[in-house]
Amino acid sequence: MHQDLMQSAQEGLEMIEQAKVRLSHYTEEKDDEILQHNNKLARLQMRFDHARSDVIVWVRRVPIHAP
């Protein structure tokens, strides 16, 4: 009986350790994905800012015609 409990406890601990390793890998993978998305967002924000700046320059160059 005691040996069965010890074996069961050991198996439980091993399962917990395996779950921790899987969680760690999953967390690392998702952190990498978030970093990639943040980098893409930063690039898109920079493109947007440049486009907005180009529009402002273009609008200032276009003469306004009064009706």
Image (cartoon, rainbow, N blue to C red):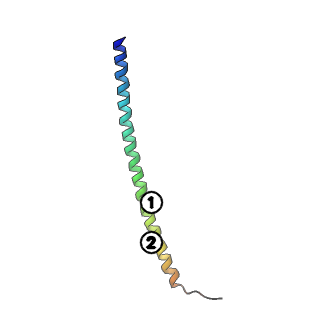
Q: Earlier in the sequence, mark 1 or mark 2?
A: 1
Image spot of residue 14 (x, y percent): 35, 27
Q: Position of residue 4 (x, y in %)?
A: 36, 14
Quarter of the figure that contains the N terminus: top left
* Rendered-image quadrant of the C terminus: bottom right
Q: Identify whether 65 is placed above or below 13.
A: below
Say which amino acid is labelled 1. Answer: Leu
The percent position of residue 40, horizontal first and vertical second, equals: 42, 59
Q: Secondary structure at mark 1?
A: helix
| Quadrant of the image occupied by residue 16 | top left
Amino acid at circle 2: His
Q: CA distance from mark 1 to mark 2?
A: 14 Å
**What residue appears at the point 41 percent right and 50 percent down from the top-left corner?**
33
- The reply, left or right, for residue 53 in relation to residue 63 is left
Q: Mark 1 packing: few (<14 Cα in 10 Å), some, or many (20+)?
A: few
- Element at label 2: helix
User: Of 37 and 1, which appears nearest the observer?
Assistant: 1
Q: What's the residue at 42%, 51% (across, down)?
A: 34
According to the picture, the residue beneath numbered tag 1 turns out to be 41
Instruction: Classify residue 37 by image quadrant.
Output: bottom left
Q: Residue at x 35, y 36 (%)?
A: 21
Which picture quadrant has residue 50?
bottom left
Q: Residues within 10 Å of mark 2 (few under 14, many from 20)?
A: few
Vertical side of 61 occupied by 9: above or below? above
Q: Residue furthest top?
A: 1
Q: Marks 1 and 2: CB-CB under 8 Å?
A: no
Farthest residue to the front: give it. 2
Tag 2 residue: 50
Dot label at residue 15? none
